[in-house]
């Protein structure tokens, strides 16, 4: 079997028949004639050396061998589509599609205006935003299954290049009814005996917060733990306690029931823009990266 003899159109015919169970329906799906589909299938069967489908009444039924081939054929076609999309992006930065991954609160917070203004600048670009746990996000970007992303630093994944792009301090999210709501800055000692809402243990920032309390010899009164900034803010609004949160993520949840007040000592988050180390940054990703740098620089401190 020679790879040079492999015909992508034959693979598309195979995939369409698997999806529809009919040469006629597959032909309609691909915009071909039924004899054309049959010729493509015969060509593929000749190449692999065995039958891929058998007829049962009016349907084509996949052989066991065809079922084994299906995932690989799907992958080949997916990669060929990605290749063509990449070629189009390289030809003209202003067109194409961009896939981005980031934490959910980052997607719904600081990234919203950055992406919206990018789309306004490049109206022919389609953007797909996704969220995964950090390890999955790292792997997807490293494997180039996703073009780029944002992740909390430091980052040491061998398959990634990360560039610092945004800093954000921790703040106290305070119910408007609390006495602390009148403060311009809240010191760690002022949190003594204050009911706290904390993001879950195991996060690097949580470890820094725990060390801050330990250094100040303050025993934190943790009333509730959660892994979601949105959930933490919901309980703050309910008056359950004060939450210590990342400012850029918490800003989207503020209203007249909740205030964000700087925390001392300062604990800072740093986010990085990540892309795969296994290939040069595509031109469309470069354009998005530059746009985000400019956007976050222009809004710093706002």
Image (cartoon, rainbow, N blue to C red):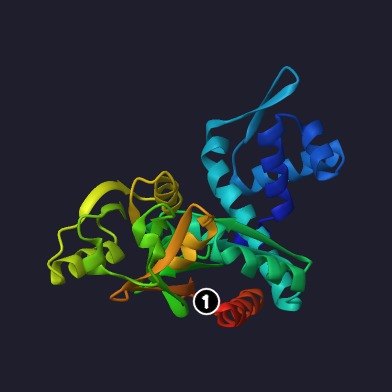
**Residue at image mark 1:** 279
Residue that appears at 79% across and 66% down: 124
Residue that appears at 49% across and 52% down: 257
Depth check, front residue: 296 or 260: 260
Q: Is residue 13 above or below residue 89?
A: above
Q: Position of residue 245 (x, y in %)?
A: 38, 61
Q: Position of residue 153 (x, y in %)?
A: 37, 73
Depth check, front residue: 287 or 256: 256
Residue that appears at 73% across and 17% down: 57
Q: Is residue 204 above or below residue 71?
A: below
Label 1 Cα crowd, 10 Å radius (few <14 / some 14-19 / many 20+): few
Report helix, strand or loop for mark 1.
loop
Q: Position of residue 167 (x, y in %)?
A: 44, 76
Residue that appears at 36% across and 50% down: 227
Q: Is residue 58 at least partly visible in the picture? A: yes
Quadrant location of the N terminus in the rendered image? bottom right
Q: Quadrant of residue 100?
A: bottom right
Quadrant location of the C terminus in the rendered image? bottom right
């Amino acid at each position: 079997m020679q790879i040079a003899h492999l015909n992508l159109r034959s693979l598309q015919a195979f995939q369409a028949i698997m999806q529809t169970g009919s040469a006629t329906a597959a032909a309609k799906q691909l915009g071909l004639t039924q004899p054309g589909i049959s010729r493509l299938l015969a060509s593929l069967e000749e190449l692999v050396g065995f039958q891929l489908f058998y007829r049962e009444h009016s349907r084509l039924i996949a052989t066991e061998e065809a079922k084994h081939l299906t995932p690989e054929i799907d992958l080949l076609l997916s990669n060929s589509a990605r290749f063509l999309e990449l070629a189009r992006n390289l030809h003209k930065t202003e067109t194409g599609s961009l896939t981005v991954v980031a934490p959910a609160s980052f997607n719904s917070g600081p990234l919203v205006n950055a992406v919206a203004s990018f789309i306004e600048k490049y109206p022919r670009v389609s953007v797909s935003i996704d969220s995964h746990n950090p390890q999955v996000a790292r792997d997807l970007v490293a494997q180039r299954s996703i073009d780029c992303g944002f992740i909390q630093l430091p980052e040491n994944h061998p398959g990634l290049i990360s560039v610092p792009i945004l800093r954000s301090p921790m703040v106290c999210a305070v119910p408007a009814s609390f006495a602390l709501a009148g403060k311009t800055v809240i010191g760690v000692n002022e949190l003594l005996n204050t009911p706290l809402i904390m993001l879950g243990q195991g996060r690097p920032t949580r470890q820094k917060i725990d060390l801050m309390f330990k250094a100040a010899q303050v025993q934190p009164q943790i009333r509730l733990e959660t892994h979601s900034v949105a959930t933490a803010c919901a309980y703050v609004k309910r008056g359950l306690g004060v939450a210590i949160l990342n400012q850029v993520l918490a800003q989207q949840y503020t209203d007249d029931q909740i205030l964000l007040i700087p925390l001392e000592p300062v604990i800072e988050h740093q986010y990085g823009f990540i892309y795969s180390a296994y290939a040069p940054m595509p031109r469309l990703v470069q354009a998005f990266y530059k746009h985000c740098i400019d956007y976050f620089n222009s809004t710093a401190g706002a």
